Amino acid sequence: MHRTQLSLNGLAMGPEKLARLRRWILGLVTVNFDLEVGPKITSIYPPLSLSHSEAQNIAFSSFPDSAHFQEGSQTHSFRIRPREPVEGEEWDIGAPRPTTLDGFIYGFSCFTRTKDASSKRGYQQTSIVILTHLAYPSLFDTLISKLAPSFMSHGGPMLEAACHNIASWSDPAPGTNAELGFLGTVIHVEIPAAIETQQSMSALPPGRTSETDIQVLASICPSDPPVLGHFEAVISHLWSIWECVVMSEPILIFGSSPSMTSTAVWWLRDLLRPIPLSGDFRPFFTIHDAEHTTLVNPRPPTAGLLLGVTNPFFERACHHWPNVLSLGPPQTGQRKVGTPTGIVVGPSPGWRSTHKRYTSRDHALMKQLEHACRGSDQNKRQASEALRQHFSSRTNALLVPLQRYLQTLIPTPSESRTNLATSPRLKPFNDAAFFASLKAHGSPLPFKSNAKQREFYERWLRTPAFGLWLARQEEVVEGVLKAMM
């Protein structure tokens, strides 16, 4: 077990309340900068077993991995794979950890840097982190943005207050709307029916009951700052980027801050819905991650991997990747963005890719986005939501020809009665029959040509995402057929 101060003096939580808390979060972690070892966990509340590898991973992931950030606070998120203790490490059986839903732990961190004359470095660096098994970026970004300033002002008791608030919430039941009280704020959150459910802003009830109320769609990326600003340099390439995401193409996403990369990665991950996630995604990934050599090496990157990074090391280590997205506004001239010391921190904002686009751009939307980049934050928020809706509708449109063909594979009632000895099943998916259907009926996506349409679907049928999607459809249809027997 990781040997740190596991709880804060005088703070305690009974087993029943702890079980209720861990329906939503695993715990709250504080991380400070140690001059000898770097970021280091200083407390975990309530107590939680972490292997040494996990503790180190959480500590480094909660701090920016670049010198670009100066003073103030910034939120970001990360996703790490749990690591079992190595031989010889003790495990605290009194601080068990709940099973994760998808094999990952999510961290939502608020990093704060303040001037401190007593420190050798001249400033104090602290992160407060929410660890959770739930992939709800908008909800937990809202929580950490509320908690961190209170903790920095009032200390440990705010962690206890936050945990007792969370323990009083109703169950995080899929497909429900919950009213969550948190540190004097009421958060109205819509929880998706499933992790692959597309959430829509139009589903939120209009208006608020008071000025302290907040409305949140749990699974989308945080709406502030507007995501459009991160993609300003690549507006004309967004249609190629969307194609790469749905084609399970790996993408290295470079930004000047973990806040920027984590927002962008969650946003791109959301565009995949309702197609099941077949690859890995890391909103903020550091060279200290336990899976660094697994994900970053001379071999071709794994399908569907979305890797958010800030360290310029990755520009060199991932030079062989087929797709590199660098976030931010377009740069004037040829000068790259640098730190105050003039050190180059990565590729200039833009899109480098081997991908050749199959679909046409929406030129009216592209002009709207370019105009919004020069407008107010409100213009950028509206344009960001329009952008999300546009690509979410494109993902749904991609599936229309497949869903139409799938209908022909459902056995008729007479066929089901004929095969009473076996469970009713979909007929096998046949590529030739699908392409005949596609040729006859087409796709709602605006392809550049019929040849491009066929090429696109030929490639998509070879992606791991298609295999997962088809398996899910078979489960649903066969469940309905069984219920009808």
Image: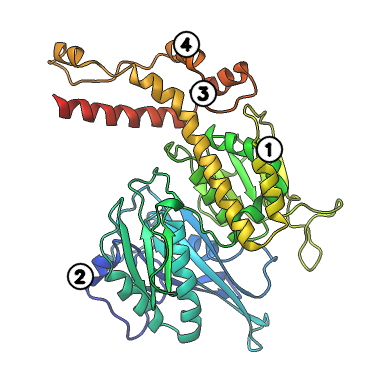
Q: Residue at x 37, y 54 (%)?
A: 84
Nearer the N terminus, badge 4 or badge 3? 4
Q: Circle 4 is placed at which residue position?
A: 436
Nearer the N terminus, badge 3 or badge 1? 1
Q: Residue at x 50, y 85 (%)?
A: 153
Task: Determine if residue 285 is in view.
Answer: no
Relative depth, front residue between 431 and 122: 431
State how far apart marks 3 and 2 are (Cα): 53 Å
Relative depth, front residue between 68 and 140: 140
> What secondary structure is found at the residue carrying circle 1?
helix
Q: Circle 1 is placed at which residue position?
A: 363
- On residue 16, the disc is 2
State how far apart marks 3 and 1 are (Cα): 20 Å
Where, by quadrant of the figure, is residue 263 drawn?
A: bottom right
State how far apart marks 2 and 1 are (Cα): 56 Å
Q: Circle 3 is placed at which residue position?
A: 443
